[in-house]
Image (cartoon, helix red, strand yellow):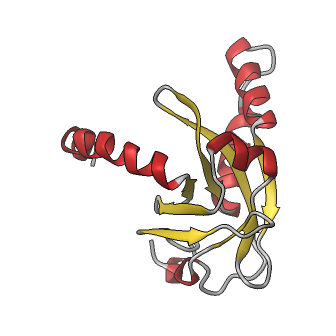
Amino acid sequence: MSEALNTGPSYQSSFENIVDEKRRVQIPANWRKGQNETEFMLVLWPSGAQKDACLMVLPPMAAQKLRDRITSMPFGDGQAEALRRFLGRKSHMVTSDKAGRITLPEHMATAVGIEEKAVLVGMFDRFQVWNPEKFGAITDGDDALAQEAFKLI
């Protein structure tokens, strides 16, 4: 995605960063080009059998797309209601500071096992924050699925 097309930043690559005593983690500088104090939606995100595997970080455009999809679902539909409750209780809004750091809420950091270090993994229009050991384990599964997954594009 090109910033020239006004699609926002593109989150690519992965970075291991320190998590300070206030649970702040630095967003890589090349992911912040032209952005100051951005609001992000954090969601406790499942992966396979891990119900709270990582934190999905949605920048404003991706967060709005999710909100639009969620709010357009019919009220009274049991699955839609369950999804709204699930995402409502497993999400939190944070704003990056002037240094480009976001503070991970304590309950979220604890749920995904993030303490002194975190791995930030770009997913083009969003990114994930992982415990380094959990991320190392998940990459083996990703590598095994890659050949089939490439058929999606």
Label count reads 0
Q: Image quadrant for the N terminus?
A: bottom left
Please tell me which residue lies in front, 115 or 148.
115
Please tell me which residue lies in front, 97 or 116.
116
Residue 12 in sight in this render: no
Q: Where residue 138 appears, x then y in whole percent?
A: 39, 43
Q: Quadrant of residue 102?
A: bottom right
Decide if residue 84 is on the left or right side of residue 148.
right
The answer to whether 130 is drawn above or below residue 151 in the figure is below
Residue beneath the point at 72% across and 70% down: 20
The answer to whether 35 is drawn above or below residue 52 in the figure is below
Residue beneath the point at 71% across and 45% down: 110
Q: Where residue 15 appears, x then y in whole percent?
A: 48, 70
Residue beneath the point at 47% across and 58% down: 123
Q: Quadrant of residue 62?
A: bottom right
Q: Where residue 111 appears, x then y in whole percent?
A: 69, 40
Residue beneath the point at 71% across and 35% down: 70
Task: Work out which residue is located at the far left of the displayed protein and give it.
Answer: 147
The answer to whether 24 is drawn above or below residue 150 in the figure is below
Decide if residue 28 is on the left or right side of residue 95.
left
Q: Where residue 66 appears, x then y in whole percent?
A: 67, 45
Residue 63 in sight in this render: yes
The answer to whether 11 is drawn above or below residue 132 in the figure is below
